[in-house]
């Protein structure tokens, strides 16, 4: 896990330095701390870090919010009013619907991946979550997930998937979507 954190943080720091956008003081901070601070700063919602590994949650936040773009499909709408960067507005994530699902892709609706009443993201244990990402099998009906980019995400390490799962356990819970898709 720590190796994954250091590698990801090192890659991020190298990219930022090569782009000339990193502060000189940032280069003096250990890579693991950059990932933790930066990862936590990307979360658009308050996080419940009680009894959670901050580094793991931060790495999950970084992967979800800066790499994988999970918000684009699992938040409906993904951006708050006036915060859609595709309309030239400064980005502002829809925190009220963050990861609550409900976005339509034809007849398919994105899942609510917030924690259920037991604290399980989308009602899945960590092992079940990893299985869904690795196989693309929809736990609700046994079919193949048609919109979820699991063929790409299946290549993530167990450490990365564990970090994403840890992050999803730290976000606020939302009720499942009630809308239907055509």
Image: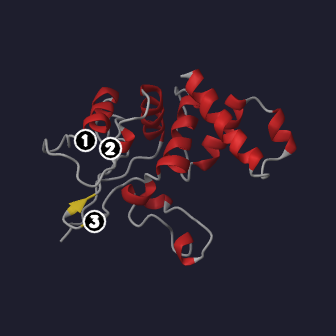
Q: Pointer 3: residues within 10 angstroms few (<14), some, or many (20+)?
A: some
Q: Position of residue 121 (x, y in %)?
A: 35, 39
Query: In the image, what residue occupies the spot 60% across and 74% down?
Result: 89
Q: Position of residue 140 (x, y in %)?
A: 17, 44
Secondary structure under the numbered disc 2 in the rendered image: helix
Q: CA distance from mark 3 to mark 2?
A: 18 Å
> Which numbered mark, 3 or 1, is in the foreground of this view?
1
Q: Pointer 2: residues within 10 angstroms few (<14), some, or many (20+)?
A: some
Q: Position of residue 72 (x, y in %)?
A: 43, 59
Q: Pointer 1: residues within 10 angstroms few (<14), some, or many (20+)?
A: many
Query: In the image, what residue occupies the spot 35% across and 36% down?
Result: 154
Contact? badges 3 and 2 (CB < 8 Å): no
Mark 3 lies on residue: 104
Q: Is residue 68 visible?
A: yes
Q: Earlier in the sequence, mark 3 or mark 1?
A: 3
Contact? badges 2 and 1 (CB < 8 Å): yes
Q: Quadrant of residue 164?
A: top left
Secondary structure under the numbered disc 1 in the rendered image: loop
Mark 2 lies on residue: 150
Q: CA distance from mark 3 to mark 1?
A: 18 Å
């Amino acid at each position: 896990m720590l190796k994954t954190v250091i590698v990801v943080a090192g890659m991020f720091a190298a990219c930022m330095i090569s782009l000339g956008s990193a502060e000189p003081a940032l280069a003096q901070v250990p890579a693991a701390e950059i990932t933790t601070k930066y990862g936590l700063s990307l979360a658009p919602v308050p996080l419940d870090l009680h009894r959670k590994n901050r580094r793991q949650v931060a790495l999950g936040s970084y992967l979800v919010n800066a790499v994988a773009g999970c918000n684009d499909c699992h938040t409906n709408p993904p951006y708050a009013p006036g915060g859609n960067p595709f309309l030239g507005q400064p980005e502002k994530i829809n925190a009220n619907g963050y990861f609550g699902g409900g976005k339509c892709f034809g007849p398919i609706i994105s899942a609510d991946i917030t924690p259920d009443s037991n604290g399980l993201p989308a009602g899945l244990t960590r092992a079940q979550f990893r299985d869904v990402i690795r196989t693309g099998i929809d736990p609700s009906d046994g079919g193949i997930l048609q919109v979820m980019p699991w063929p790409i995400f299946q290549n993530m390490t167990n450490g990365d998937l564990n970090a994403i799962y840890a992050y999803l356990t730290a976000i606020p819970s939302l009720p499942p979507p009630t809308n239907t898709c055509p």
